[in-house]
Image (spheres, coloured by chain):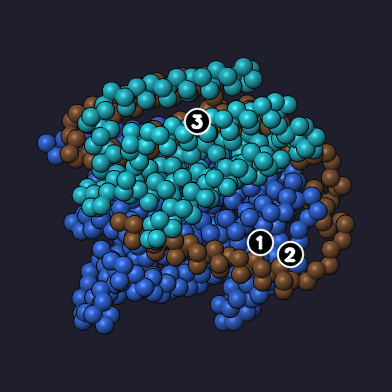
Chain colours: A cyan, B blue, C brown
Amino acid sequence: MTLLQIAFFFLSALALASAILVITRRNAVHSVIWLIVTLFSVGGIFLLLHAEFLFAVQVILYVGGIMVLFLFVVMLVNLDVAVKQAQFSRQWQLALATAIILMAELAYGIYRGHQGFTLAQTSAVPPTIGNTQAVALALYQDYMLPVEIASVLLLVAMVGAVVMAKRKLE
Amino acid sequence: MATHSDLPLLLLMTLAKVVVVLGVLLTAIAYIVWMERKVVAHIQSRWGPYLVGPHGLLQPLADALKFLFKEDIVPDEVDRPIFWLAPLLAFTLAFLSISVIPFGESITIAGHTIPLQITDLNVGLLFVLAVTSLGVYGVALAGWSSNSKFPLFGGLRSSAQLISYELSLGLAVVSVVLIAGSLSLREIVEQQRGLWNICKQPLGFLLYFTAAVAETNRTPFDLPEAEAELVGGYHTEYSSFKFAMFFMAEYANMVTVSCLATSLFFGGWLGPVFGPPLVRSLLPVLWFALKVLAFLFVYIWIRGTLPRFRYDQLMGFGWRVMLPVALLNVLGTSLIVAWRSV
Amino acid sequence: MLEAYLPVLVHFLVVLALGLIILGLSAWVGVKRPSPEKLAPYECGMPPVGDARERFSISFYLVGMLFILFDVEVAFLFPWAVVYKSLKWPGFLEMFLYIAILLAGYLYIWKKGALDWSR
């Protein structure tokens, strides 16, 4: 096994283990911390695929942005009440069974048709231009329109956030 | 680039560099605290620390020992794992960004050319911003885990402050990237050989430095620690070295911010070099250190001069002045760059 | 390229170890004389009243949400700035439009008073 493979398996195991901890912790803040660990491990996998820019953005946006908002919300949860509440909904057995069946189907599908899937490969030759440059040229030369649409989406989200909050402010 | 056979060499060299850099940084932090107490004291016509050693020069050592032997109080109501995690997180993150800062060109020892930088990342600048964006967790988690009112208020307030000023910080940095066309700090410094970026980006520098002062929770933006209203802010319940870790993190962040300001706007290690080869490779480090020291002095000077903002003024300033000005600065810079490259 | 990240990992591990050693040493060396009053949450000397984790002003959530939106915008700006010199005028127009759309949203939230903290 090469160092890269060891790093990959370590990060994948970390991502899965922390993801399980996210849904099993009773304390919401602990869940948030484990979710941060999950996001970090995924970022590390991006890095192993030479996607430096994605790694940095994963940390800046998901860990440094979205999770902060999550933390703001769950920080103020009253823990005594949270402990008394049922952790999972009543249909959890049914949900578990469905999830297992779905996973089996997927595993079977992948096993039977694995020729049809191409897994992401680390390129053997190092890329000639940096990851950031490659992403940038793709975004701003080939996908101009989607980028502009993204800004409209952000605008909509901004208006939505203010409309929701204003009802409470006034 | 390194192949697998020089991996042990690379690791060894890195370890040596890390130990040197951390040693210098920790010593520097101890003496910045001393410098701060001295400078602020003289601004206020006092003497400052004077008893431990000549001119109080051994004061940092005495402080460290005192922190170590103080009672490490962990209140009953706290969330223990996170109460321990928060200072560790603040400390680790504060000392992490220094790894991509270039201190000088390179030094040749026994035939090996060693760059004076722990590592040069292609996305070095984004790395620093990513680490900065995580800084909010130390503060927020310290406030939450204490399970006490003042720390929680302090933690929430400073989290909101940190994320607000992070936007202006990022935008101010974008305008430098527009000029340099690279995210590698080494390349950004190299490109300032003719003219330092401060001449091309005076407004960008002002925005950067203001946002950086707010990001490091320093006066006039030290709302998290507003003693008069919040007791001690997010670290009210911390004592002993756990408190000292937040303290050290604040000063380490000041050093990082000053290093970044030097690299982005003031030509990093660039300066006149002369003399034999060894002096030639070490002089840049001196220029770098002097520039960083000048920034640290400005930090302390500001603290001795300006009063603290009110919270609504602070947030208003961040969102209604800094953010639009930084956005317009990016647009203006891009207009000029496009004009000149046609 | 990945070799460049190895030193960061080494640096991180050294700093983490240093932090753990300092924390452990301080917890081990310091005196321990706990008392119920000392271990109570600090509230200026009064016995603590009620739970600390209460409901907060909606402004904190609003600022969190707006931060994420603008942060996404800044994240888009970085790659653009890196290749800007090869994009030239089309790149400028593209980003001008992008920022203009967001400035419209910015003006909206300003007019709605979402940036006013004195209330």
Q: CA distance from mark 2 to mark 3?
A: 55 Å
Please give the chain letter of the residue carrying mark 2: B
Mark positioned earlier in the residue sequence (1 or 2) = 2
Work out whether residue A130 can be spotted. yes
Q: In whole angstroms, how far apart are the C-alphas of marks 1 and 2?
A: 8 Å
Q: Are marks 2 and 3 on the same chain?
A: no
**Callout 1: helix, strand or loop?**
helix
Q: Is residue B229 visible in the rendered structure shown here?
A: no
Can you say which quadrant of the picture contains the N terminus of chain A?
bottom left
Give residue A98's position: percent from left, percent from top.
60, 28
Q: Output the chain of dot 3.
A: A
- Tell me whether circle 1 and circle 2 mark residues in contact (CB < 8 Å): yes
Apparent side of residue C60 relative to residue B201 in the rendered image (left or right) = right
Quarter in which the C terminus of chain A is drawn: top right
Amino acid type, residue under disc 1 in the picture: Lys
Residue identified by numbered label 3: A105
SS at mark 2? Answer: loop
Q: How far apart are labels 1 and 3 at the CA level? A: 51 Å
